[in-house]
Image (tube, rainbow, N blue to C red):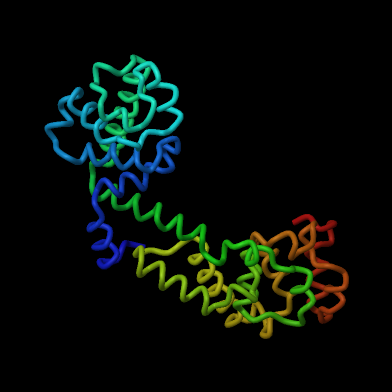
Amino acid sequence: MRTSNRAAGVVASVPREDKLCYLAKDRFPEWTDDFRQTLFQELSSGASVLHDREALLKSVLFGLQDGLPETQLQTLFQAADAHSSEDILFLGLHQLPDAARTWLSDQVSKALAFNTEFASEDKLNDEYQKARVSEWDSDAIYNSHAASNPDMRLWRKRKHWYVEEAVALLLGKDPAIIKAETAKTLRDEARQKFGRTTKFLKDYFRWTSELDKALAAKHLEPPIKPTSFIMWGTDRGLPLPAQLTNSKGLASEKDVDELNPKEREVFYSIFSDGGKI
C-alpha cells in the first residue's frame, strides 16, 4: 500500500539526520546514540565540510564530547592522556594516537557511505517508514506472548468457531485476544501513522475474506465446525499450526466421529494412504 499523504507529510518533516540515525541503529549497533547523532549532524551541517576530510574529522571529534563508546575512550585515547570524555575537547586531531585516528576515520567513512546510500530522499523516507512499521509490528498485541500461545486443545473442543476465531487460530493467535475489531483498530492505526499496514494484518483480512467466500460458496457450513475447517484448510494446503491439527497434521479420531457420514467418507478418502497428502 502506498504511503498516505498525511503519513508522507509527517515523514518529510523529520530531519534527515534523525532518519539516518534511526536506520543506523540496526546497521551499526556498536555506535552509541550520541555517537550516531553527532556523526550525522556533522554530515548534515554543510556540503563544504564533506569535501574536506580533515575538517570533517575535526568537526566530528569536537562534536563528540561524551558521545564516544566508553570502550573506545578507554582503549584508544589513553595514549593521548584522555582519561575522560571531556578531555577529547582539548585534543587536536594531530594529538590522537594512530589507532584512535584510524578508528575515528573508519567510522566517519561508514557514516559517509551510509549517507550516500540514502542520497535519495524518497528511498530514505521509504526505508524509514518500513523500519518504523517493523518496530511497531514487533510491539503489537498480536505478537505478544499471550496472543501467540493459544490453547489449541481447548479451542479444538469447541463445537463451532466464528469466522474471526477460525482466522486467528489459522494464524496461530488466540481468538480471545485477537478479535476482528482489534485487528481493524490496529490496521487503522498503522495506516494513519505509517500509510501502510503489516503482513499479519494483511493476512488476517485476506483470510477473513477467503472464509467469507468459502461460506458463501458452501465449501464450509456455518457455524464452522473445527474438524470441517481443518479438513478444508488441509485440502487447500494452508499452513495450519501443528498444535491445531495434531503433530501429524490430521484431525483426531474423536473429531472424525463427530462428522456426519458424508464428511467422514470424504475424510477417509483423503487420508486413506496413512495421512500423506
139 lies above or below 30: below
Q: Quadrant of residue 197?
A: bottom left
74 lies above or below 202: above
Q: Nearer the viewer, residue 230 or 100?
A: 100
Q: Residue at x 31, y 20 (%)?
A: 101
12 lies above or below 76: below
25 left or right of 111?
Answer: right
Residue 126, given in percent of the width and then of the height, sits at 32, 52
Q: Quadrant of residue 25?
A: top left
Residue 127, given in percent of the width and then of the height, sits at 35, 49
188 left or right of 4?
Answer: right
Residue 83, given in percent of the width and then of the height, sits at 39, 26
Name the quadrant of the N terminus.
bottom left
For the view shown, which residue lies furthest in the left direction?
Answer: 48
Q: Nearer the viewer, residue 112 or 126?
A: 112
Q: How many numbered marks, from 0 up?
A: 0
46 left or right of 269?
Answer: left
Q: Nearer the viewer, residue 156 or 276?
A: 156
Q: Residue at x 66, y 79 (%)?
A: 220
264 left or right of 11?
Answer: right
Residue 206, given in percent of the width and then of the height, sits at 51, 69
Q: Residue at x 77, y 82 (%)?
A: 159
Name the quadrant of the C terminus.
bottom right
139 lies above or below 174: above
For the view shown, which residue lies furthest in the bottom direction?
Answer: 222
